[in-house]
Image (tube, grey):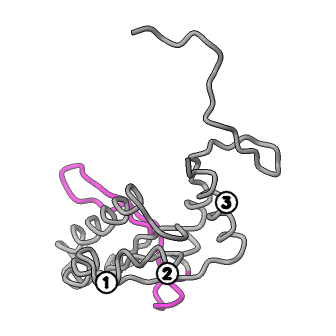
Amino acid sequence: MGFWDGPPVSAGDAVTPEGTTVHPSDSAAQRDAEPLMIDAVAAAIGVPLSKRKIDLGDGVWCEVDGVSNDGLVLVEAFAHHGRMVGGQLRKVSEDAFKLVTLAKTRTCARLILVFADDVAARSFLGRSWKAEALRLWNVEVLVVELDDTARDGVRAAQVRQYR
């Protein structure tokens, strides 16, 4: 097998208003929205939350989107609007698995998955095995509303990412 010797190939360039090129799969808008979602949860439950790496021992650690000062509130955020598919569902399932793993050493921890849209949250609510698993593990599912700028940024990123 040889290497490509032709001109650079692009999947398509999205151009921001500032004129800088953004890769179609760039998720900066979602990453920017997640701290806003964590702040909304913190305000709703009255507990300050911040992103933190948690040591699991033996050199293993994980990063959690929102952790209370005492480590007993653990929140993972997923900034997506609309129906979720494939890898999106897997990502949220992995986040839930992370939370329940951390709860094994924090038996009275409050575990929360937060979504930016009720349609996105539906796969983890109601009558599905994922929803039942979250209930069994005492993982709360919350939905918060993003401001117009953040919501529009997430939606625009999703349109760009869809190929």
Name the amino acid type tagged 2: Asp
**Disc 3 from disc 1: Cα separation:** 33 Å
Nearer the N terminus, badge 3 or badge 1?
Answer: 1
> Residues under labels 2 and 3: Cα distance?
18 Å
In the picture of the structure, the residue carrying the numbered disc 1 is 110
> x and y percent of residue 150 in the render?
66, 69
Disc with the residue nearer the chain's start (2 vs 1): 1
**Depth check, front residue: 143 or 124:** 124
SS for tag 1?
strand
- Please tell me whether residue 51 belongs to the stretch shown in magenta: yes
Residue 95 to residue 125: above or below:
above
Direction from residue 138 to residue 26 in the image, left or right: right
The span shown in magenta is 40-65
Badge 3 marks a residue whose secondary structure is helix
Helix, strand or loop at label 2? It is helix
Question: Tag 3 or tag 2, which sits nearer the N-term?
Answer: 2
Residue 30 at what x, y percent from top left?
A: 57, 61
Does 22 sit above or below residue 155? above
Name the residue that disc number 3 marks.
Answer: 156
> Residue at point 22% right, 77% down?
133
The type of residue carrying mark 1 is Arg
Name the residue tied to disc 2.
118
Quadrant in the rendering for residue 102: bottom left
Locate residue 146: give its quadrant: bottom right
